Amino acid sequence: MKADLIYKTAGQAERLTALEQNIPYAVATLERDGGCYLWVVRQCPLCGKKHTHGGGCLSEDPRIYLSHRVAHCAGDAPTGGYFLVEAE
Ligand SMILES: [Zn+2]
């Protein structure tokens, strides 16, 4: 099985877990920031704004950071968390 396929399957499992637990999920894309990875949520499911989450160092697999994360919403937006899910 190709690695990509394993990761895709993992992403689907996270989506299902989020749905079952009634937790929103945020689609995130991977970007590089110097010697680190960033997971960028372009549109937060809670407030609609852009948030970034740490994705570890370049020597790590950034996908281990795809999990339940606290949303970085500002101001009066609803607070809570979401599952980070890799964009397809
Ligand atoms: Zn937000």
Image (cartoon, helix red, strand yellow):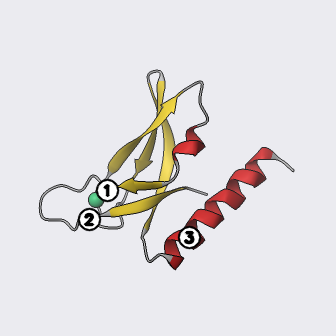
The residue singled out by tag 1 in the image is 71
Q: Position of residue 2 (x, y in %)?
A: 83, 47
Residue 49 sits in quarter: bottom left
Regarding mark 3 in the picture, which secondary structure is present there?
Answer: helix
Q: Is 31 situated above or below 46? A: above
Q: Amino acid at mark 1?
A: Ala
Image side of residue 8 versus residue 23, left or right: right
Rounded to the nearest angstrom, the CA distance separating label 2 from label 1 is 9 Å
Queried on whether the Cβ of the residue with tag 2 lies below 8 angstroms from ligand 1, the answer reads yes
For image coordinates 69% across by 52% down, the residue present is 7
Mark 3 sits on what residue?
A: 17
Between disc 1 and disc 3, the foreground one is 3
Q: Is mark 1 within 8 Å of ligand 1?
A: yes
Residue 47's mark?
2
Determine whether label 2 and label 1 are within 8 Å by CB.
Answer: yes
In the rendered image, residue 38, in percent from the top left (x then y), is placed at 44, 38
Measure how far apart labels 3 and 2 are at the Cα level.
21 Å
Image depth: mark 3 or mark 2 in front: 3
Q: Look at label 3 and name its amino acid.
A: Thr
**Circle 1/circle 3 CB separation < 8 Å:** no
* Mark 3 vs 2, N-terminal side: 3
Q: Which mark is residue 60?
A: none
Q: Nearer the viewer, residue 28 or 55?
A: 55
Q: Residue at x 62, y 59 (%)?
A: 11
Quadrant for residue 22, please give it.
bottom left
